[in-house]
Image: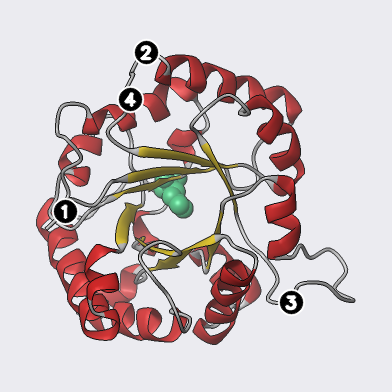
Amino acid sequence: MTAIRPLVAGNWKMHGLAANLAELKSLQDLLAMEPQPAADVMICPPATLLAQARYFLSKSDILLGAQDCHPDSQGPHTGDISAEMLADAGAKAVIVGHSERRTDYGETDAVVSQKAGAAHRAGLAAIICIGERGRERQDGATLDIVKRQLDGSLPPAATAANTIIAYEPVWAIGTGWTPTPEDVAAVHAFIRGRLGDELGGEGSAMRILYGGSVKPSNARELLTVPNVNGALVGGASLKATDFYAILSAYSGTGGRGR
Ligand code: PGA
């Protein structure tokens, strides 16, 4: 089987003003030292910075992503942004169903599936986030939650090219805590199995990212776990040097993760 090319995506969340785009320039300079990076690299800045970031990255392989989209392409939805608008501003992908949105806005799996479908409609890849809360892990319900969210959030016609799954245990996001590599391996193997059952070969080739307190000191142990095909990085993506250090977990591994 061909190895899956990893993706390391940075989610800036609600951080970043125009001045912070200098970090993109620094990241680009750091990446320029590697002629053949072993992973795809993406930054998802706030929507306000997408168009400027596209200008900054015009000569770079760094991909641009967005953090959320509305299911509709346009309409009377004050404050919302459609997937078409994000594509127009330069995004190639959009995160949907992040636990912060599920919590802050009560987004259900059905809504997340609609948003992922909207991304596909606009030609964007959907990065679909799933993951259990701390209490659910303590109760031994991790795989039940992951199964329910995965089944409910995957839109029809999901393919390995247009969909990426991000497993993010909610209790690990922004806390400094992480699951053990064995725990990550168990959940990712489960997700891989489900994707294969649902989508056949497309599911076997789909990228499954790990997210939750990934930092330079733990990146290698987490990102070389079987079936981990990259990372979704929050806090540590805000500084180019930290994000680059995470990416170097793939240097010399030839894109492992299968
Ligand atoms: P974190 O966030 O790396 O700051 O834990 C990850 C995420 O929410 O995507």
Residue 114: x and y in percent read 59, 80
* Tags 3 and 4 touching, CB below 8 Å: no
Which amino acid type is shown beneath numbered disc 4? Ala
Residue corresponding to mark 4: 245
User: Under 8 Å from ligand 1: the CB of mark 3?
Assistant: no
Q: On the image, which quarter does residue 197 sit in?
A: bottom left
Which label lies toward us, 3 or 1? 1
- Kindly state the secondary structure of the residue where label 1 is placed: loop
Q: Identify the amino acid type marked 1.
A: Thr
**Label 2 neighbourhood size at 10 Å, few (<14), some (14-19), many (20+)?**
few
* Residue identifier under label 2: 33
Closer to the chain start, of discs 2 and 4, is: 2
What amino acid does circle 2 point to? Answer: Met
Q: Between residue 102 and residue 6, name the one nearer to us.
A: 6
Residue beneath disc 3: 72
The label shown at residue 2 is: 1
